[in-house]
């Protein structure tokens, strides 16, 4: 069913909100920012939301370091994102530098490079551009958008046999 836009969200007591938010956190890893927004949408004030967040942290239902690790693993293994894009997203989610560094340690260098090669080869098969120089540029831009570093992109393109000297 669709919710009508003029309907106000249901207000919860702190006890009810704790039960709902505990289930919300148990379903998947969350950031404190996400949990606080959800609690505020339940009609709780800042102090009540803060107390619930502290309790969730103590009970290990809310752990930003664990969130960062899970986020990095999922986005570099399944979505095949590069380090730069993952880092940008973690910062956008409001995580501390410590949590971000901890999460980024989840990236295995060899698997990361293999992901880059796999994404590049897939894009190469899909690319319709015939001009080798333009084709290389388009693939490079795509990989940059996925968050991969320029030096790795150049190395992977050279390995693919799309080196600029071959294009004359």
Image (spheres, rainbow, N blue to C red):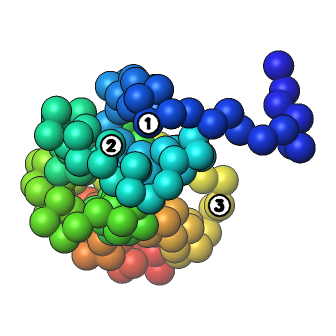
In percent of the image, x 63 and y 61: which residue is there? 130
Q: Is residue 72 visible?
A: no
Q: Secondary structure at mark 1?
A: helix
Residue named by callout 2: 52
Secondary structure state at the residue bearing disc 3: loop
Residue 75 percent coordinates (x, y): 35, 45
* Sequence-first disc among 2 and 3: 2
Q: Give the Cα distance between marks 2 and 3.
A: 55 Å
Label 1 – label 2 distance at C-alpha: 8 Å
- Above or below 94: residue 122: above
Q: Secondary structure at mark 2?
A: helix
Mark 1 neighbour density, 10 Å: few (under 14) some (14–19) many (20 or more)? some
Q: Does the residue at mark 1 contact the one at mark 2 (Cβ under 8 Å)?
A: yes
Is residue 103 toward the left or the right of residue 19 in the image? Answer: left
Mark closer to the observer (2, 3) = 2
On the question of residue 159 being in view, the answer is yes
Residue 14, disc = 1
Residue situated in front as seen by the camera: 166 or 124: 124
Q: Is residue 22 left or right of residue 138?
A: left
Q: Quarter of the image holding residue 62?
A: top left
Q: Earlier in the sequence, mark 1 or mark 2?
A: 1
Mark 1 or mark 3: whose residue is earlier in sequence = 1
> Which numbered tag is attached to residue 68?
none
- Residue at 71% across, 38% down: 9
């Amino acid at each position: 069913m669709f919710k009508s836009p003029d309907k106000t969200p249901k207000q919860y007591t702190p006890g009810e909100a704790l039960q709902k938010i505990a289930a919300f956190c148990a379903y998947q890893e969350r950031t404190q920012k996400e949990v606080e927004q959800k609690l505020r949408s339940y009609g709780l004030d800042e102090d009540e939301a803060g107390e619930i967040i502290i309790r969730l942290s103590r009970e290990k239902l809310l752990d930003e370091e664990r969130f960062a690790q899970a986020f990095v693993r999922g986005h570099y293994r399944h979505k095949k994102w590069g380090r730069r894009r993952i880092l940008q997203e973690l910062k956008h989610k409001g995580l501390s530098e410590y949590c971000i560094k901890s999460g980024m340690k989840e990236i295995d260098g060899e698997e990361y490079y293999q992901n880059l090669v796999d994404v590049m080869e897939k894009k190469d098969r899909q690319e319709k551009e015939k001009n080798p120089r333009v084709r290389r540029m388009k693939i490079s831009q795509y990989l940059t958008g996925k968050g991969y570093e320029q030096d790795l992109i150049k190395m992977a393109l050279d390995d693919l046999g799309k080196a600029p000297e071959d294009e004359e």
